Image (tube, grey):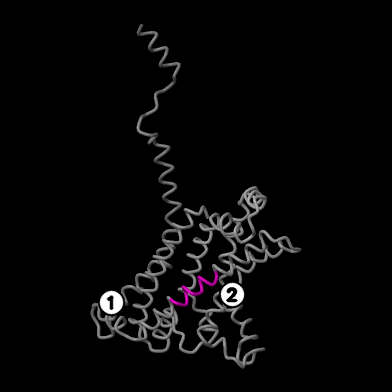
Amino acid sequence: MAEAVQNARAARGPVRPRGGGHGPDTVRRSRGALLWALPPVALLALFFLYPLALVVRQSFRPDSGGTSLQPYADVFASEAFRHALWTTVWLAGASTAGCLALGFALALVIAFVPFPGAKAVARFIDVYLSFPSFLITLALLFIYGTTGIVGSFQFLTTPWGVLLAEVTYFTPFVMRPLLAAFSQLDTAQLEAASSLGARAPRIVRQVILPEALPALAAGGSLVLVLCLNEFGIVLFTGAKGVTTLPMLVYGKAILESDYPGACVVAVVNVLISVGLYGLYRVVSRRAGA
C-alpha cells in the first residue's frame, strides 16, 4: 500500500507550495516590476507632485512670514475672487451646454444624414482635437476682432465672445464620443421605428437620445473640466471684465506679485478640477468610454 502511494506521488511530480504561488520566481518578478515602476514614479513626484506641494505650502505662508490661513481668508473675502469664481462657473456651464447642444446636432447630421464627404468630416474632427485653443481664437479675431469683418460690433471682447470661442473650440470634444456611440447603435431599431410611422424628431427623442446619454455625459464632463481651466481663449480674446480663476492666478502672480494669493486661487482651481475629473472618470466608466 505504501509503495502504491509513493508511486502515485512520483507520478504527480513534485508538490507545489500552497498560498497562491508565492515562490521565489513570483517574488523575483514582483521585485523586478517594482524596480521598473520606480523611475516613472520618481519622475512624476519630482516634476509634478513636488511643484504642486510647493504651491500648497506657499498658499499657507503670508508675506508677513510664518504659517497661517490668512492668505485663504484674504482671498475668500475679496470681491475679485468671488467675481472670478462666478465668471468661471457660468462660462464653463454655458459653454458646456452650448457644446452639448451643438455637438449633438452636428453628430446626428454626420452619423445619420448621408452626404458626400461625411467620413472626411468625421476624420477632420479627430484632427481638430489636436489644434491649440489660441489658434481657433486667433481665427475668430479675423471675423469678430477690432479689425475683423464685423469688428465694428466689438463682439469678441465681451463675455459672449469668450463663450462663442469656447463653444467653437470644445464642441468636437463632445462630438467624438457621440460619433463612437452612434456607430454602435443598432440600425434595426431605427428601421423598425421608421416602419411604424415614427417621424425623425420622435426617433431622435425615443431611440437615439437614450443611447447617446452616456456619451453626452462623458463628453460634457470633459468639456466642463477643460472650460474651467481654459486660459488661452480668455487671454487671446482680450475680453474686458472677464476674469476667470486661471486669469486671476496670472494677475496675482505676474502683475501683482502676490504669490500667496495666487497659490490660494490655484489650489481652489485644482480642487474643483480634480473633483470634476473624478466625476468625468465615473461617467466615462459607466459609458464604456
* Marks 2/1: CA–CA distance: 39 Å
The quadrant of the picture occupied by the N terminus is: top left
Instruction: Answer whether residue 92 is magenta in the image.
Output: yes
Q: Do the residues labelled 2 and 1 touch (CB within 8 Å)?
A: no
Q: Residue placed farthest to the top in the image?
A: 1
Residue at x 59% of width, y 80% of height: 137
Query: What mark, if any, has residue 255 been given in the picture?
Result: none
Q: Residue placed farthest to the right in the image?
A: 116
Residue 32 in the image, given as x and y percentages of width and height: 44, 46
Residue at x 57% of width, y 79% of height: 134
Disc nearer the start of the sequence (2/1): 1
Q: Give the range drawn in magenta.
A: 90-99
Residue 118 in the image, given as x and y percentages of width and height: 71, 62
Residue 265 in the image, given as x and y percentages of width and height: 36, 78
Instruction: Return the residue nearer the eye: 78 or 63.
Output: 78
Residue 90 in the image, given as x and y percentages of width and height: 44, 77
Q: Which of marks 2 and 1 is in front?
A: 2
Q: Is residue 168 left or right of residue 270?
A: right
Q: Could you tell me the amino acid type at mark 2?
A: Thr
- Residue bearing the label numbered 2: 168
Q: Residues within 10 Å of mark 2 (few under 14, many from 20)?
A: some
Q: Residue placed farthest to the front in the image?
A: 197
Q: Quadrant of residue 70?
A: bottom left
Query: What mark, if any, has residue 60 been given in the picture?
Result: 1
